[in-house]
Amino acid sequence: MGTDFLQYVISGITIGAIYAMVAIGYNIIYSVTEIINFAQGEFVMLGGLFAVFFAGTLHLPLYLAFICAVAVAGCLGLAMDRFIIGRARESSVLSLIIITIAVSILLKGSAMLAWGKDPYSLPAFSSGGPIMVAGAAIQPQALWITGICALVVIGLTLFFRKSVYGQAMLACANNPQAARLVGIPVRYMVFLSFILSAAIGAAAGVIITPVSMMEYERGALLGLKGFGAAAFGGLGQFFGALVAGLILGLAESFCAGYLSSGYKDAVALVLLLMVLFLKPEGLFGNREAARLKKF
Amino acid sequence: MSGTGYQPGEPILKVNGLWMKFGGVTALRDVCYEMPEKIIQAVIGPNGAGKTTLFNCISGMLGPSEGSIIFLGHAIEGIVPHRIARAGIARTFQHVALFKKMTVLENVMMGRHPRTGSGMFAAGLRLPGMRSEEKLIRSKALEYLEFAGLAGCARVESGTLPIGKQKILEIARALATEPRLILLDEPAGGLNMKETEDLGELIQGIKKLGVTVMLVEHDMNLIMDISDRVLVLHYGEVLASGTPAEIKENSAVIEAYLGAENDN
Amino acid sequence: MGRRNWAIMLGAAAFIGAFPWLVMPFKAVSHYVDVMVFAGIFSLVCIGLSLLMGYAGQISLAQAAFFGIGAYTSGILTSKLGVNPWIAMCAGTAVCAAVAWLVGVPALRLKGHYLAMATLGFGVIVNIIFAEEVNWTGGPSGMADIPYLRFFGRKITSELAWYYLVWGIVFLVLIFCFHVIHSRVGRALRAIHEDERAAESVGVPTASFKVKVFMLSAVLASIAGSLYTHYVTCLNPSSFNLMWSIRFMLMVMVGGMQSLWGALVGTVLMTFVGNEWLQVFAELEILAYGAILLVVALFLPGGIVSLGSLRRKKHASALEGAGT
């Protein structure tokens, strides 16, 4: 019983870290543009599959495959904004939603053409057996996942709090007109947000692939759960996304362990609905500020 | 809506100890005011004095932090806007809020909404009651368009009207709800002199219909010409109130306005 | 509903009425009648979605879920409990209306992105339930042997009978919805789309109107689901997944959101694209949908039906530009 519990906690934290990273992807674009990118989940899927391509097909070393996959996804994110979203910036919210959904289907369809419908796997980042803690097994990959997630969260928090670029990006969201007046190149900040967001999503995709494999249609659900974490933590809140991601991961893991594995995917979604219905500004969001925003 | 009955002659609107706070900012500070019926009441004050916030509280767009608003003997603070419209308060917006893709006539027909009641099934099945109601909506709406002098452009898409006519149309739409009190938020904003004059006449016409008018306005000439009473807000507080002549002479008001100008 | 719409309606009815007789003699296209039955069924969903999205301006990615709830309610009641199919259909609409109310009241307080995500999440949950409740729904492998519809004791089996039944219902629903649009209720819905604050200020209870139109769209989807069940006589959760919600949205977008005719045209066209013309390139189907959706959203937001009026609009705006 105790061991089971510990084991569920470990797998919950591992998957929760992934959700947190997906959520952070949403947060970055949202912070800068107030757009919710429905294609976010597809970048996770693409990250995993591109890593498979670079490591499995081109036989690059794993760390290089990781970097290449993240870079490719970043470029795709840039292209998405440059060629598609950028053209529609004046559109209604409804059109923007539909456009990002269209992009997500395009990415999914392309992935299906390129990789087919089979799931792919990657070798773990470091070899060696699981580490035993109080009877529960921790896969080394789980440590990689939590570690990389922690790095991303800390790095981004510092970036947005301390660096000039980060501050400039946030200024674009608060008031693009004013940001332009004080000389911030708003357009580049938006590019940057799409690149960063896609890259972080892809990184999440690469590190999860050794654990749970990756196939073309995983994107939508990962994206939706990631959005659940983002909304739960309060849109735009990086720390909130981390906490919420972990909570979702744990809830899902416990549900799979103790209740029903079939319904484990529904747990995160039910939580998402409850948050949206009862506290749409999220755990760490500000209600006053949320009322002014476009949702 | 609870409260005592309303006798004619009593103030139509009583605002009591009204506070409105947004986070750390206090937009209204203990505003108390009683407004007689069937007059033109102007609300003036420098930018940020809380005029629009007061309108938003009265029309239900904002729930005040504290205090009460009594309309026709009923407490209405914190009640949702559509109920307040039904209760007899109509409003216009500082930035014109028409249904731009609908025709001029349809906009005014929208104003009939709180006075009609056919639902989705009555409409879908074209029940006789609904058909006669629809005819009535149309003829009433035309009457209000006529009153506002817009009957000529009934079939035009309202977003294509010049701004002056849009402002008048918004007033016509508000009037079509058959209000007892109508709130006009800067109706003369963006109008030229001739249009402002016509607006003044229209507002006096509204008063003759027996509707109480409350307006926020920056055009002092218009206010001095048409209003019966003036309420001056300053930093969310009532600074003075009285007839236009009294307000002109009020030293506190003069100081506030001059002070505000010096700040600029 | 205006003389112009009645004229289009008559023309459309004449075409739909004659269609089977035009294609049946030719072997290569005689199965188009079957495709059109599906198009009619999907039209019901899309007419509802058009009211919700095009008129009231509220996005929903849950239409496939309501379609599925209707379908499974009919399927389960008729095949497992032996209920009369027509009664089961009514039960399905009642269930859908209730679910739509439960979800709609909290969800429609949200706007834009959040509403889209909430309906998306709800849709996925419903789909998981279809797949997991194996005892009732047969789970991922589906459920079969659903009885046929009966009309005065006679089984409806022929394609032609189905065709006229389905399209008869479509036209009744279409007339109902046109009447709704050209009424106090329809104006209020459009007002909500344009400016919710202003709509409130003239006394429109926006929240309750949004829930009502959401319920109407759910009920229409449910009727469509029940018809679908009895037509194909077997059900599988994959017919009601997220991709289908997106397809319904695509159908409405392609035809044109701001018009019920658009929903109809888009549905028929996209049903032929999906069931017929893209079958050859099954692998490309998702890609094609994405591309079409993107092109329409970016370059033709008014859909196909706006093509005709586009020229007029351009002319008008040129005049306007000259005036100012």
Image (spheres, rainbow, N blue to C red):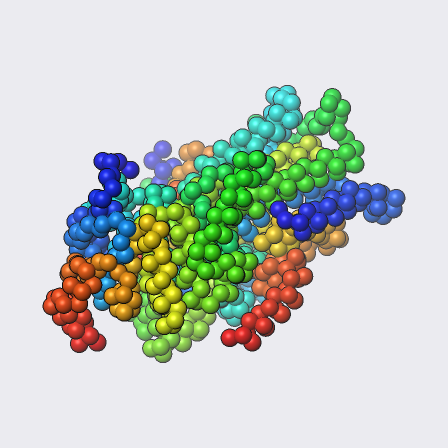
Q: From the top left corner, tell me how far across and down residue A273 is, in percent.
A: 42, 43
What residue occupies the far left of the structure in this picture? B251
Q: Is residue C107 left or right of residue A46?
A: left
Is residue A281 placed above or below C86 in the rendered structure? below
Q: Is residue A79 left or right of residue A285?
A: right
Residue C230 visible within the image: yes
For the point 43% across and 46% down, the residue is: C204
Residue C57 visible within the image: no
Q: From the top left corner, tell me how far across and down residue C178 is, in percent.
A: 61, 45
Between C235 and B157, the one lying in front of the other is B157
For the point 36% across and 72% down, the residue is: B193
Is residue B151 placed above or below C39 in the rendered structure? below
For the point 61% across and 25% down, the residue is: C87
Between C267 and B184, the one lying in front of the other is B184
What residue occupies the far bottom of the structure in this picture? A183
Q: Is residue C159 left or right of residue B225?
A: right
For the point 15% across and 60% down, the residue is: B240
Q: Is residue C67 left or right of residue C20?
A: left
Q: From the top left corner, tell me how far across and down residue C9 is, in percent.
A: 70, 46
In which quarter of the view is residue A169 placed? bottom left
Is residue A253 placed above or below B237 in the rendered structure? above
